[in-house]
């Protein structure tokens, strides 16, 4: 019988790995940011699973909360056009 | 940063009417602006050429839905000048009362909209609540709240109702108190100051170059008021100050308009005191069948600036050969794309609102 | 008694009663045995779920209450007759039915999405927003017993999840493929960058004084003196940054309705809009609750201990601590409503200035002040009153001087 720990480990590890791959594969840069964020969430889940609560919290605080927004901000600042398709306009 | 063209209108909560403004933004900063006028065009000036003066009178009310009577009065004054008749003194006092009440109501609408543009939603409700008092007075005097159709060539339609004086004085006392309260919620409000000081600043030379008049020009620092320099009706017999700003920014536009409201309150009081007894229409006056073949240009101080009518009679019919209406906000709005550049997207409604646009009058 | 043992007692009593009833009816067999085993293995999960639902329901009820209070209060402040009087008919005068009418309207509305929107991200935005907002409720204890979790780093967990929303806002703003929503999302990111750091730093002084990240410990430390007295600067910074975090006026730039139509929410309708709005109020509740826990003594009673003998025996020594907590939260929320009625909206560059040039130095200064006091005047710790005076007078004087110099402008 699979223990709860193993089950959740598989879930979180899969989330982290698949999202990491998708981060590289995504065509839209914003999609990459989303998958990167979900990778971080998966890793934070792993930390929680290892009873490293503080590390997990800090992972969420810094990576999920701050770094992804910072990356999003960097996209805004550097890209001339981040609309997916030109939605009209003069 | 991300560059794009952004539509601020015509269907946009920022516009106080149906005005098209396209701005090219770089992130939040405006790099370029274009405006398009005519969304609400109705051809009022052309309609006037096909109607007799009496039939055209009610349409004047539709020129501006915020300051209706000021346009009707202006047109009537132009026609009277064309016909070389003078309305009785009491009628002129009543006209001034209506004009000044209209100015108060118009400035209240402006103040509410201006504050709601910066998210201060309490103010819009307060201002519109107090505007109701003016509308009540209009209803009492003219029978209508918005479209009064009150002035007539040769006077006004009816005399003051019996208790109008008391009611108006009471309302004016209330308005005096409320002006102080507006000062508290707007002028002493740190955020209001932050959002308006230095926004859309129009130095005096540029204001003159762009043809600004009225509160817009006075905010830039020039004391110029048609009521003072070219007195019409009985304004030369009344005592009032012309408030002047310094920098022509959003803050000065606010202070000038609030002070004008106070002056209008005092003007209404003075009129009610000084008003003589007598007729309100020239006795036995009938509209002539033929307008004289002359042209007059009559200007007046609209709540928004210097409004004027240019009427040409053809000497054959009682329809104007040509009517030209000078709308102050039309000129103000055309100037906005010049000085909006460099502002932020958040400043657009404030700069736009500072000009107090009334699109019905702009697009005519 | 904490929430888990209470709930597990209740659930076990109900389930045990059910099984007893089944067996009393003479039904025995493999199915009943299997069910019993199943319950035995799932007991923990079921109890956790019940606790979670309980916390969520309390949070949502608070949202409804806050919405109602906001409407009533802002109606009075702005002189809106309709909200003052309420709808005539059912619920006459209270206007309470209006909330449910609004909810039903939003639930049955058609769920529209723009043609060129990125549909998955478009749907994910409000979902992430609500999920992250609700997740914070886990970390917030309403009293020593009524808490879903008792993490050692409860405060920092709440902060971590609380700061997650701007990303969801940015996603939904970007995905709708609309220029107004895009600018709204960009503004949300800008706002987070400028106010998140002072928000976190403002808590450091409190944490230093309490010596713990556990919210229960922090509340216990305020038994004699609330931290609002000891940390006035921290509270000012926290309050301003919190308003910015929960995106209310004067910092509701991402949904500035004057220039951006409805900001990042422009394209949302129906349930998604309801989610967006609900998450805003949940975040408002969480922000106020954290403020109460950190600065206003949490669930401790503001009145001195007393007890009144009741006529039917027993004695009454004040309402339950949860009630005090909720009352304080609502009072703090009323201040937010008042701020909303009195102030306008700041500009983007102004909020960046405010965050980086005003709040951040203030928060750092507060930390330095706290540490300095703890180092140089440790003997004050025994005398709470002296400590309060020593902390608050210079801080308040300083804030007043900053205000006078127009430094906050």
Image (tube, coloured by chain):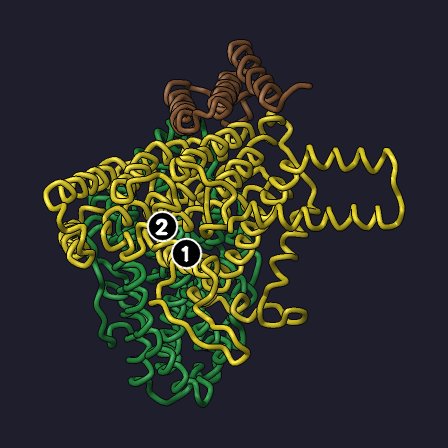
Query: Which dot marks residue C82?
Result: none
Is residue C200 rendered to the left or right of residue C364?
Answer: right
- Image location of residue B224, percent across then percent down: 23, 58
Q: Which residue is mark 1?
A: C299
- In the rendered structure, which disc, 1 or 2, sits on the residue that comes first in sequence? 2
Instruction: Give above or below for A23 relative to C230.
Output: above
In the rendering, what colour is chain A? brown
In the rendering, what colour is chain C? yellow
**Residue at horizontal 58%, vertical 69%?**
C94
In the foreground, B147 or C311: C311
Say if residue B317 shows up in the picture: no
In the rendering, what colour is chain B? green
Say few, some or many: other residues with alpha carbon within 10 Å of mark 2 (under 14 / 14 to 19 / 20 or more): many
Instruction: Give above or below for B301 relative to B92.
Output: above
- Marks 2 and 1: in contact by CB < 8 Å? yes
Instruction: Give above or below for B155 relative to C378.
Output: below
**Residue at horizontal 27%, vertical 49%?**
C236
**Residue at horizontal 52%, vertical 76%?**
C313
Say if residue C107 shows up in the picture: yes
Q: Which residue is mark 2?
A: C219
- Image location of residue B230, percent across then percent down: 26, 64
Q: Secondary structure at mark 2?
A: helix
The CA distance from mark 1 to mark 2 is 8 Å
The N terminus of chain A lies in which quarter of the figure? top right
Q: Quadrant of residue C29?
A: top right
């Amino acid at each position: 019988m699979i223990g709860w720990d193993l089950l959740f480990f598989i879930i979180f590890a899969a989330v982290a790995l698949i999202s990491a791959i998708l981060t590289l594969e995504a065509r839209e840069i914003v999609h990459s940011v989303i998958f990167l964020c979900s990778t971080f969430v998966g890793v934070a889940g792993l930390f929680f699973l290892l009873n490293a609560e503080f590390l997990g919290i800090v992972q969420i605080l810094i990576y999920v909360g701050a770094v992804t927004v910072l990356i999003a901000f960097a996209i805004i600042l550097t890209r001339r056009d981040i609309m997916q398709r030109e939605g009209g306009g003069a | 940063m991300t560059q794009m063209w952004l539509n601020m209108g015509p269907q946009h909560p920022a516009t106080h009417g149906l005005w098209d403004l396209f701005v090219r933004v770089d992130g939040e900063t405006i790099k370029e602006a274009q405006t398009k006028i005519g969304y609400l065009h109705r051809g009022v000036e052309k309609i006037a050429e096909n109607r007799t003066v009496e039939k055209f009178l009610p349409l004047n009310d539709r020129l501006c839905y915020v300051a209706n009577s000021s346009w009707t009065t202006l047109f009537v004054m132009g026609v009277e000048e064309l016909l070389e008749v003078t309305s009785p003194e009491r009628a002129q006092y009543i006209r001034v009362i209506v004009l000044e009440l209209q100015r108060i109501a118009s400035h209240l609408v402006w103040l509410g909209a201006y504050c709601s543009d910066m998210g201060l939603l309490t103010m819009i409700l307060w201002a519109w609540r107090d505007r109701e008092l003016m509308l009540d007075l209009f209803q009492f005097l003219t029978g209508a709240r918005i479209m009064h159709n009150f002035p007539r060539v040769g006077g006004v339609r009816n005399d003051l109702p019996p208790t109008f004086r008391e009611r108006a004085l009471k309302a004016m006392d209330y308005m005096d108190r409320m002006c102080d309260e507006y000062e508290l919620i707007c002028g002493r409000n740190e955020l209001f100051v932050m959002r308006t000081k230095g926004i859309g600043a129009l130095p005096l030379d540029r204001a003159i170059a762009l043809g600004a008049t009225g509160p817009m020009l006075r905010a830039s620092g020039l004391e110029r008021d048609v009521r003072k320099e070219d007195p019409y009706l009985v304004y030369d017999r009344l005592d009032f100050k012309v408030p002047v700003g310094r920098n022509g920014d959003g803050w000065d536009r606010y202070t000038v308009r609030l002070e004008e409201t106070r002056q209008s309150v005092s003007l209404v009081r003075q009129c009610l005191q000084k008003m003589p007894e007598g007729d309100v229409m020239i006795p036995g006056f009938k509209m002539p069948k033929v307008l004289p073949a002359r042209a007059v240009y009559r200007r007046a101080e609209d709540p928004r600036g210097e409004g004027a009518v240019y009427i040409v009679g053809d000497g054959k019919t009682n329809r104007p050969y040509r009517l030209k209406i000078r709308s102050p906000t039309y000129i103000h709005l055309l100037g906005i794309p010049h000085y909006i550049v460099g502002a932020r997207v958040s400043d657009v409604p404030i700069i736009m609102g500072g000009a107090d646009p009334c699109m019905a009058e702009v697009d005519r | 008694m904490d929430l888990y043992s209470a709930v597990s007692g209740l659930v076990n009593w109900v389930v045990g009663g059910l099984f007893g009833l089944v067996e009393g009816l003479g039904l025995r067999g493999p199915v009943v045995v299997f069910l019993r085993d199943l319950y035995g293995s799932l007991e923990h999960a079921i109890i956790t779920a019940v606790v979670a639902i309980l916390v969520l329901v309390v949070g949502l009820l608070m949202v409804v209450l806050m919405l109602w209070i906001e409407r009533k209060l802002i109606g009075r402040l702005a002189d809106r007759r309709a909200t003052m009087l309420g709808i005539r008919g059912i619920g006459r005068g209270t206007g309470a039915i209006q909330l449910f009418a609004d909810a039903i309207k939003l639930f049955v509305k058609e769920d529209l999405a723009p043609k060129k929107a990125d549909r998955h991200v478009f749907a994910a935005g409000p979902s992430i927003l609500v999920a992250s907002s609700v997740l914070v409720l886990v970390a917030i204890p309403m009293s020593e017993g009524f808490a879903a979790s008792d993490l050692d780093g409860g405060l920092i967990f709440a902060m971590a999840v609380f700061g997650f929303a701007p990303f969801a806002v940015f996603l939904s703003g970007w995905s709708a493929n609309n220029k107004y929503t895009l600018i709204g999302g960009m503004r949300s990111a800008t706002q987070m960058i400028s106010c998140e750091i002072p928000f976190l730093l403002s808590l450091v002084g409190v944490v230093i004084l309490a010596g713990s990240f556990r919210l229960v410990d922090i509340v216990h430390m305020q038994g004699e003196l609330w931290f609002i007295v000891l940390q006035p600067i921290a509270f000012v910074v926290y309050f301003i940054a919190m308003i910015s975090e929960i995106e209310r006026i004067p910092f509701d730039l991402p949904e500035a309705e004057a220039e951006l139509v409805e900001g990042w929410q422009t394209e949302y309708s129906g349930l998604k809009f309801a989610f967006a709005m609900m998450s805003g109020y949940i975040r408002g509740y969480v922000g106020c609750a954290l403020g109460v826990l950190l600065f206003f003594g949490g669930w401790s009673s503001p009145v001195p201990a007393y007890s009144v003998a009741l006529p039917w025996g027993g004695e009454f020594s004040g309402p339950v601590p949860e009630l005090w907590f909720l009352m304080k939260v609502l009072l703090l929320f009323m201040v937010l409503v008042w701020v909303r009625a009195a102030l306008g909206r700041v500009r983007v560059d102004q909020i960046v200035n405010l965050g980086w040039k005003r709040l951040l130095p203030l928060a750092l200064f507060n930390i330095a002040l706290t540490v300095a006091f703890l180092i140089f005047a440790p003997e004050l710790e025994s005398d709470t009153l002296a400590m309060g005076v020593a902390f608050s007078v210079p801080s308040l004087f300083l804030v007043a001087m900053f205000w006078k110099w127009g430094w906050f402008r």
